Image (cartoon, coloured by chain):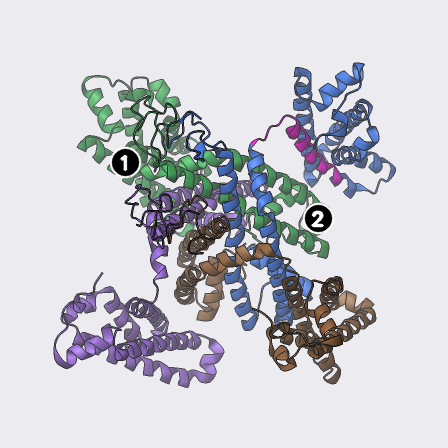
Chain colours: A blue, B brown, C purple, D green
Amino acid sequence: MKHPSEQSPPPGIRARLHEIIFESNTPAGKAFDVALLWAIVLSVLAVMLESVGPIRARYGPVVRIAEWGFTLLFTLEYVLRLFTVRRPVLYALSFYGLVDLLAILPSYVSLLLPGAHSLLVVRVLRLLRIFRVLKLVNFLGEAEVLLTALRASRPKITVFLGAVLSTVVIMGSVMYMVEGEANGFDSIPRGMYWAIVTMTTVGFGDITPKTVPGQFIASVLMIMGYGVLAVPTGIVSVELAAATRRGGLNPEACPGCGAEGHDVDAVHCKFCGTRL
Amino acid sequence: MKHPSEQSPPPGIRARLHEIIFESNTPAGKAFDVALLWAIVLSVLAVMLESVGPIRARYGPVVRIAEWGFTLLFTLEYVLRLFTVRRPVLYALSFYGLVDLLAILPSYVSLLLPGAHSLLVVRVLRLLRIFRVLKLVNFLGEAEVLLTALRASRPKITVFLGAVLSTVVIMGSVMYMVEGEANGFDSIPRGMYWAIVTMTTVGFGDITPKTVPGQFIASVLMIMGYGVLAVPTGIVSVELAAATRRGGLNPEACPGCGAEGHDVDAVHCKFCGTRL
Amino acid sequence: MKHPSEQSPPPGIRARLHEIIFESNTPAGKAFDVALLWAIVLSVLAVMLESVGPIRARYGPVVRIAEWGFTLLFTLEYVLRLFTVRRPVLYALSFYGLVDLLAILPSYVSLLLPGAHSLLVVRVLRLLRIFRVLKLVNFLGEAEVLLTALRASRPKITVFLGAVLSTVVIMGSVMYMVEGEANGFDSIPRGMYWAIVTMTTVGFGDITPKTVPGQFIASVLMIMGYGVLAVPTGIVSVELAAATRRGGLNPEACPGCGAEGHDVDAVHCKFCGTRL
Amino acid sequence: MKHPSEQSPPPGIRARLHEIIFESNTPAGKAFDVALLWAIVLSVLAVMLESVGPIRARYGPVVRIAEWGFTLLFTLEYVLRLFTVRRPVLYALSFYGLVDLLAILPSYVSLLLPGAHSLLVVRVLRLLRIFRVLKLVNFLGEAEVLLTALRASRPKITVFLGAVLSTVVIMGSVMYMVEGEANGFDSIPRGMYWAIVTMTTVGFGDITPKTVPGQFIASVLMIMGYGVLAVPTGIVSVELAAATRRGGLNPEACPGCGAEGHDVDAVHCKFCGTRL
């Protein structure tokens, strides 16, 4: 999906800036991307560290100054992006445009509403901006095969999740009935939370069956979950194998005997020896 | 498995109603299915919400009225189904007939026996009615491949579960002997519950080994469970690959003997030798 | 592995008894096996129920009488087996001979040593006798493929377990050093127990890292365990696929064109049409 | 990777010692390796046992004497290795050279700094020396296939881990915001620790969501982790299958151009067309 602004860049300095900010073919564009990557990682790190009580107590002012530095930097970048694209409104409403805005908005809002501390966590979404850079420099060719396999698995995994969710609703209700409020299963949604924790083999242990029938039903659910866990793995394995095979075979047929399925590095047909 | 009532519908208005309720080819039938789907989902949601204490306290009357609306709706539907099928007894005793009855019965019973509150949870089984609708509109073609793979895996998974259960009995008894009542292992069934929780890697932590030999035995069981977890996954992967491959078989029947199921690279029928 | 006693049965009534007890071709032999299967399952159930406090308190005498019934039955069977085999000593020292003895010994020992209650749990090993019956009636043809795949996977799984155990030793020591006795990591073996609980994703939560560096190291270990879990699954999948394929392909080459890889039900070569 | 010292051993007694210590072709070299293996295992066991409080209290002096025996033994071995290799500095700075040093250093340091008890745990790294012995005697041919598969999986697994880590950062921040300090999520890093514990299905239960929205978000994360767990398994399965298959390639080189790696069904060389 090409960004609307990338099709015909405006002339002059805007075109130059556009090339630096949105593309990564030129040295300047590449340097910009690398700098942006570091700024993103460091700013997310700052958000994370600021949330730690002792660090906030001791290094609070330092972190806050760094944070404002990043905010001003990202604001400048956002303004430049708006300036250099041809259709700023389209950009501002695109997915990455909104992420760019969310990366700077919380800091300004917290100036106006001093109580909005929890809002600052939203800045962690800056992390999503990394994918923009990676997408531009085409860093992750390998991701393609994975995504192809996952996309091909989606219909089967949807069916599978539907079956899992039905089991969760029914088992959650059964446990609510069997164990009851006294043992922590105080509503059907709570029972469903327990059923998900159990079927996915996470098993926090914050809610556990206490009665004998409850433990028996839990055992059945766990053994079922054991077999069930195998299904998505099987699905993804098969689709990954297919995606790998498709990427790894020569699509051409032999002009001599018409045989297919040659390796990508084959020069001659492996059955009749004709040059491919 | 064809429903007995679908073979030769009765004439007149009953036939028309039958078409709407049991089939989904006509626009009216489709609309009925979609409406039913929504009614099922909303009524299950109502059952779930009613079980939540604070919601019951505040919105109790609203939820109860909605609940009675769904009950009357499903009762009407149940009566219509009985009226439009040719052999009502057969329908009433079929799997979906019983589910349809269970979906409405608890509400009426709770009128007669005011104490039967826990019975109301049974209404969550209405969820199973979703599969009836999905089956009719043939929503889930993908489910076929999954079911084929699971059906083919069944004998192997049964053998596998037998081995797992034997391990559970023996390890549960060993831990009952080693850890004893003081550490929560107060009977062999309790030890088996713990062994299942451990082998399936759920690990609630409600019962854990406290003694050194107990922790050693638990470690062995966990490492074993680690390798064992691989078996059902491998089984399902292999069968899924086979089911997918069979989906890629040559769809043509042999012009000579009519046999199907030839490989895609087959030139001659593998049964009679006729050229395909 | 043929049992030494099965090669040339003694003549007369001993031969007849031998046939009933050790073989399952005759109707009497089959009936004996089915009866034995039920006796084993029921006696294991009795051992399990006797371990439950409330049941022992109320139905103690009944369970104990049933238990002695099973013990006498198995004693009779053991004596008959000794009587009908040609070389009783060899049988008595074989794996199943020892299991047969362990199935009855604890009851007699508990008569002499009244304090040896915990010994009674040993009787749960009677469960192993089920496999003797299943082996004789050849119940589990499917188990062959599974065992072949597991046997083929063994060298790879051994290497894999070696790597896992090394990680467990090193991570357990690191956590002992980092977290220390105050947080439950009171020795290296305890740290190893924690590392196994964590790497296998069981996660009881009886011992958990409390310090920040400890939680960081635990996170690394968990993410590693995540990727590592994939290895045995992959191994078993590949070997199972190989075992299934070997069982499912015609080993013959076509006499006409020499092509291989025909299905087992193929009558004609799928490439040239020659009769196989 | 050949060790620099193995290329041209020095003459005389040094050459003889070098052969014994670094190679394992001669009977003396093999005996040395086996003895070293035992010394390593026993010394690691001693370190482990010394960390257990009651054992240290009772058998402290015995363990300490054994420990010093191993230290002197490994010191002698280290000196001999330095003496017999051609370029001692290169050896001392190599990976195994450093491991050899770390195996003896802590004991000596603890003489000078009596408080450095925790340092002694470092000696558990002696375990790494096992791999040196195994590498020399070429014990683990099977490990090759596993390593090949893992190496081939690395790029895909890296991409996958990147996606997992991004999810961990975002979900950790969300839970910090939703649950807050009162429920144990007292910073974003703590939330990330919880997210890792949950996504890997370890589920210690030391920190668990208490609020309804928190439990809902946790449910979504667990179901996601469920599907996600399938991806590395699929990757490793596919690569293992490929590595195994390559093991099944045509071992013959082309008589025309000498190229290797032809499929088993190849009739002509795929590079130059010569008949194989």
Q: Residue D4, position in %: x, y?
A: 33, 20
- Quarter of the image containing the N terminus of chain B? bottom right
Name which quarter of the figure residue A20 lies in. Answer: top right
Q: Does the magenta segment cover residue D42? A: no
Q: Residue at x 67, y 28 (%)?
A: A133
Label 1 sits on a secondary structure element that is helix
Q: Residue C194, position in %: x, y?
A: 48, 50
Residue B61 horizontal side relative to residue B4, left or right: right
Q: Does the magenta segment cover residue A140? A: yes
Residue at the farthest right position: A112
Task: Mark 2 vs mark 1: tell me if same chain.
Answer: yes
Residue at the farthest top position: A12
Residue D9 horizontal side relative to residue C146, left or right: left
Q: CA distance from mark 2 to mark 1?
A: 52 Å
Marks 1 and 2: in contact by CB < 8 Å?
Answer: no
Q: Mark 1 or mark 2, which is nearer the start of the sequence?
A: 1
Q: Residue at x 33, y 48 (%)?
A: C152
- Report whether residue A174 is seen: yes
Residue type for callout 2: Glu
Q: Which mark is residue D181?
A: 2
Please report the bounds of the magenta region as a residue range. Answer: A122-141
Which chain letter matches label 2?
D
Label 2 sits on a secondary structure element that is helix
Of B25 and B174, nearer the camera is B25
Residue type for callout 1: Leu
Is residue A75 positioned above or below C241 on the image? above
User: What is the number of callouts on the image?
Assistant: 2
Q: Residue D44, position in %: x, y?
A: 36, 41
Q: Which residue is mark 1?
A: D36
Q: Residue C82, position in %: x, y?
A: 18, 74
